[in-house]
Image (cartoon, rainbow, N blue to C red):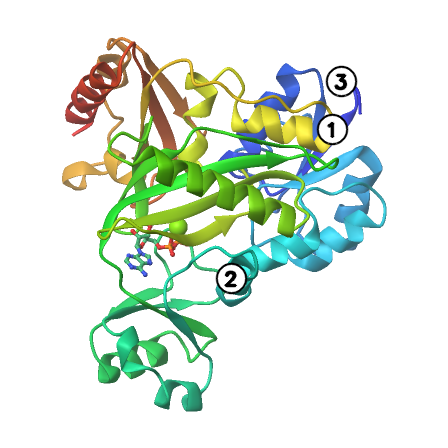
Amino acid sequence: MAPGAALGVLGGGQLGRMFVHAAQQMGYATVVLDPDAASPAGAVAHRHIRADYLDPAGLDELAGMAAAVTTEFENVPAAALERLARARPVAPGAAAVAVCQDRLAEKAALQRAGVACAPHAAIASAEQLARVDPALLPGILKTARLGYDGKGQVRVESAAQLAAAWESLGRSACVLERRLDLAAEISVLVTRGADGAVVHFPVQRNVHRDGILAVTRVPADGVDTALQADAIAAATRLAAALDYVGVLCVEFFVLADGSLVANEMAPRPHNSGHYSIDACDVSQFDLQVRALAGAPLVEPRLHSPCVMLNLLGDLWLQGGVAAEPDWAGVLALPGVHLHLYGKAEARAGRKMGHLTVTAADAGGADATARRAAALLG
Ligand code: ADP
Ligand code: MG
């Protein structure tokens, strides 16, 4: 699909918005399907189809306008992707997205690809609950589906707490994972083309607060380079095993004993890859556009060490008063790239934007990021 064609996106959040920006820069028209009138991607796309993800008329309109369709939202119903795929190329495909929607299917896929994951067990019935292996405690009970940003997770110390947690999660299908001793969290983005070619970004080192990504640093200082190579190889293997087309993110834990364990996958560009817009010569969104359009993939090159800070709604709500953060102060710092997603309402824990700080060296990026964080409070 040459520039000038239209590319479609299911889902209209910030990931869709940044995809639209990248597609438009390359001369593609864009169509977003999202039910929300205030959708961040819908606001910048050439056309915003306001329809439910399963609305046949909306899906057919999207397929009618777009030469190919991607998704920015991993919980998009598989039936929507399947309907679109009957009319247009869809990347990633419904089967790969379905694996990433279910933590149990995801762990099975990791194991099939020979990638280690946390010791775990399915808790989907009272029998499974009664038979649980005590070696999985202390653990984290996670809903198998629809969890994000630490939502749908309960930390449990004992069998009694586990039973109560499963009740609190509505006795839904869950996975219990042993709580691991994390030395670091990292993630890897790979992009695979329809021809099987794979390129990868440098490894990111991530810090989460309250289950939500807070800071990403690249290069992943302090993480053994052989381990980083293992993570890249594992993500590449997973993309091939899933016959994946597009950008795939794999999150890993580095354990205190120096081993590597895969946590979860996202079938799309990822928050921890936003740094690539400002610090790499080709971004995760550029590569998603290329993979979808069947254009050549190139190895990304990090041209500046960087630190990415997520901007959550809490920054607007300090001391109980709604106020705009000190953007002028932040923008006066060198190498700061401000990204705001155009969301009207700030809520605690809501991703409103991010800041990337680039610098000549990692120490400089860190120092500036610390000053930016101090100004933001
Ligand atoms: P989400 O889909 O909400 O991102 P994750 O499974 O990635 O859920 O969990 C969010 C965070 O919780 C992780 O980034 C990590 O900090 C912590 N966490 C999750 N699982 C474990 C585990 N088994 N042991 C220790 N920490 C964990
Ligand atoms: Mg996660």
Q: Which mark is residue 293?
A: 1
The picture quadrant where one finds residue 61 is: top right
Examine the rendering and report whether any part of residue 82 can be seen.
yes
Residue 42 position within the rendered picture, expressed as x and y whole percent measured from the top left: 60, 33
Vertical order, 43 against 212 (above or below): above
Q: Residue at x 54, y 36 (%)?
A: 190
Q: Which residue is mark 3?
A: 3
Marks 2 and 1, how far apart in space?
A: 31 Å
- In the structure shown, which secondary structural element does the residue marked by tag 3 occupy? loop
Q: Residue at x 57, y 61 (%)?
A: 112
Looking at this view, is 250 or 260 the one in front?
A: 260
Q: Which residue is mark 2?
A: 111
Badge 1 local density, few (<14 within 10 Å), some, or many (20+)?
many
Vertical order, 115 against 348 (above or below): below
Looking at the rendered image, the quarter that the N terminus falls into is top right
Residue 330 position within the rendered picture, expressed as x and y whole percent measured from the top left: 25, 16
The amino acid marked with disc number 2 is Gln
